[in-house]
Amino acid sequence: MNPLAHSRRQFLQFTGAAAVVAAGHRLVPAWFNAQAAAPAAQAVPPSLLGDLAFPEVARSHADALTVPEGFRAEVLLRRGDVLNPQGERYGDHNDFLTWLPRDERTAWLWCNHEDAQLELADGSWGATWTRERAAEFLRWQGGSAIRLERDRRGRWRPVLPHAENFRLDGLTTKIAFDGPAAGTLWVHGAREAIGTTSNCGGGLTPWGTVCTAEENFQETWGDPVLGTAPSQAAGFFPRPSEHYGYIVEVDLATRAAVKHTALGRFAHENVAFNTARDGRLVAYMGDDRNGECLYKYVSEERYEPAAGAANRRLLQRGTLYAADTERGRWRPLDPARTPALARAGFDRARICVHTRAAAKLAGATRLARPEDVEVHPETGEVYVALTAWQPGANDPRRPAYFKEAAGAIGALREAGGDAGAEEFDFRIFVPGGPDTGLAWPDNLAFTPERHLLVTTDFSVKPRPEPGGTQETFGNNFLVVVPTAGPAAGKVKRFAVAPRGAEFCSPTLSPDGEELWVNVQHPGGDSTAAEITSRWPDGGTSLPRSALVAIRRET
């Protein structure tokens, strides 16, 4: 039996079955062992979307959050909401969200903050960059930890302000490095970094801590390898680019945070955990950039449920692999096993920082923006959102399986069903395009019924370009896709985002009665001459990223 089974049963006893199927990384944590079923007495009813009993919504170009008839959406948090007595505020561009139980009536809510559009926060179009403006830009990023409680109606809601609420940001938060690169010349001798930025997706560890993924770090700190210059904010707060682009683990109980260099440095979309047959911890990750790779990390030691947070050491020592999807092989990023890395002068520390170069030397396949990666809770199959191949359909390097420029969802099955295997089969589960109803998939999540929730992320302009993705599909949207049965692979549209926005991180509430999802950067295509969205407050207000709860009307 998988060693994670024990921790799942403990979690069931603590939170109740309805909470378990909703808790953790998105909807069903990858580390919930499929074979460790809950006792029959703890069976739960279908989840909010489990029976697919909702009318499919039509495409829309409206500045509104559209849900099916019989459902309603409520805004729970908005950019700028005051979190605590110190005046810290809920950040901008809310992306990944998850929650962790504390007791029967309280829990932690965590939300990432990926970026900031200061013009839409204060209307300062064309403002000159100052040190104060740069500091504000970095403060908006990072993550928010917020207390959840049941309200009088029995619904789980954020408590604002509250003394326990806190922020990690890109300006002041000190975060330790661990793993092979810590203290080496590849991170300029540092053992800690200041700040976390570009926080996109994330994950939940088996021992109950949050992981936040640093994605497009080059947009703030630059990247000498890509030839990307630092932002104007970095001009006031100069820091090495090599200090960003990692998976950051956050212990909400202690507020301690660490950047795990052993998991590599690239545009991390998220992290999804599983265990190998022999008990070693496995972490899957995607690099959200065109022509980049899919990764897997396997720890040296085994996961021990009784060790609790001490299992953090598993993310310090292990082997990082990159996927060769053409040959079905995991290529070890280890100079002792891959001679090309040794010949090029790559030691373990350099691999952790210059991971992209190491993956190419090892023979990994360049993919079409591999973003969110999730593990099927029953089959162990690994699903990956391949968002789109850019610059487009005529690029001779485009993978053959991209018949449309609208992306795809790939599925990877490990040899023998063992997450620790070094061989696999790879296939396209759902191709993008008008025929399937899928376009530019970004975030993935499983319902308890093993349906896949998929959110999209394509560019939305004030006016759709003729023949473009937006003209065909409308605004960005959220769909439900069964992974088994007669409807497997069939796309059903559940919600449409406001103008300029994308949906992020669909997650069931602790009681399983609501779907929580972040609405990121509404009006993100605005200019000083044209504000394209007034969501969520309407009127003449500026648009704000926000967390919403969607539930059935009663």
Image: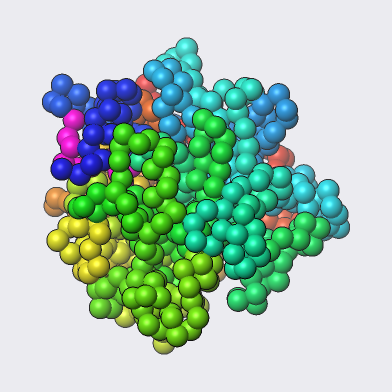
- In the drawing, does residue 62 fall left or right of residue 422? right
234 or 320, which is in the foreground?
320
Number of numbered tags placed on the structure image? 0
- In the drawing, does residue 353 fall left or right of residue 19? right
Q: Is residue 306 magenta?
A: no
In the picture as drawn, the residue positioned furthest to the top comes out as 152
Q: Residue drawn at (66%, 46%), measured in percent from left and top?
A: 174
Q: Residue drawn at (78%, 53%), measured in percent from left and top?
A: 134
Q: Is residue 30 magenta?
A: yes
102 or 510, which is in the foreground?
102
Q: Is residue 24 above or below residue 11?
A: below
Q: Residue drawn at (86%, 54%), measured in percent from left and top?
A: 130
**For residue 413, what is the image quadrant?**
bottom left
In the image, which residues are magenta?
29-38
Q: Residue drawn at (59%, 64%), measured in percent from left and top?
A: 184
Res 116 seen here: no
Most prominent secondary structure in the magenta stretch? loop
Q: Quadrant of the C terminus?
A: top left
- In the drawing, does residue 13 fall left or right of residue 494? left
276 or 544, which is in the foreground?
276
Indicate the position of residue 71 as horizontal and vertical percent values. Answer: 39, 32
